[in-house]
Amino acid sequence: MLRNHRPRVDGPGAGPLRTSALAALVAAALLLPLTVASAGQVGGADAKARTPARAGGSPASSASPSPDRVTSARCGPEIASPDGLEAQTCVLTRGGDTWARVYYRNTTGDAVDAVLSLLGSDGRAVRTTCATGADDAPATCETPRERARGGAAAYTAVSEFARGTEGPLLLRAGSNSVDGSGS
């Protein structure tokens, strides 16, 4: 007669294996949100993307966007300063509106002042002061939207980060930069 025989689960070597498996599971659970948060924006210059959320904070519709709901982004390179700031500045257009957005991360440990400007070819400028925390979390800041005058190529965005209004410039990033030195 055959008996069902199960191997001992708590035998020699089972403890280290369980511990390793548990450690790997905990590490994956902790690193997954960090990986997603640091992934950043997908696509390069002139990338087309839908906005992930509306102004009210609710998720955007998963339905196919109509032509006036597609956002066009023209971004400069990601720039990093030795002081611990990272930024990428973009000009965004959707429908007949245009605005500037800066994606940034402040790892300095101190809050810094930031100014984001949207510059038009006709000399018009829209300027916004951005509140940057010292929490090392990726964040964004946008200028108000305005009716586009000319194409998206007629606009440039510049973001500048400094310690205080009279402090030295820590980082400048532009939407028209083609190399890693900013604008």
Image (cartoon, helix red, strand yellow):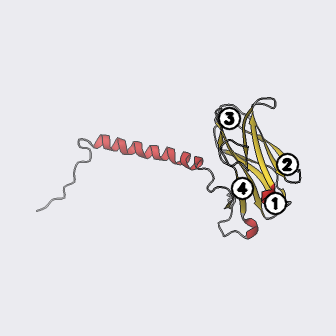
Mark number displayed over residue 122? none
Q: Where the C terminus falls, by quadrant?
A: top right
How many residues crowd mark 1 within 10 Å: few (<14), some (14–19), many (20+)?
A: some
Q: Examine the rendered structure and indicate whether residue 4 appears above or below residue 103.
A: below
Q: Which residue is mark 4?
A: 74
Q: Nearer the viewer, residue 54 or 104?
A: 104
The secondary structure type at the circle numbered 4 is strand
Residue placed at 85% from the left, 54% from the top? 121
Residue placed at 35% from the left, 41% from the top? 19
Disc on the earlier residue, 1 or 4:
4
Q: Which residue is mark 2?
A: 126
The secondary structure type at the circle numbered 2 is strand
Q: Position of residue 164 (x, y in %)?
A: 78, 31
Q: Examine the rendered structure and indicate whether residue 110 appears above or below residue 102.
A: above
The secondary structure type at the circle numbered 3 is loop
Which residue is at the far front?
A: 179
Q: Which residue is mark 3?
A: 134
Disc on the earlier residue, 3 or 4:
4
Distance from the alpha carbon under mark 2 to that under mark 1: 13 Å
Q: Amino acid at mark 1?
A: Asp
Q: Is residue 113 left or right of residue 42?
A: right
Which residue is at the far left?
A: 1
Distance from the alpha carbon under mark 1 to that under mark 4: 14 Å
Disc on the earlier residue, 2 or 1:
1
Query: Residue 110's image quarter?
Result: top right
Q: Which residue is mark 1?
A: 97
Nearer to us of marks 1 and 3 is 1
Residue placed at 34% from the left, 44% from the top? 18
Disc on the earlier residue, 1 or 3:
1
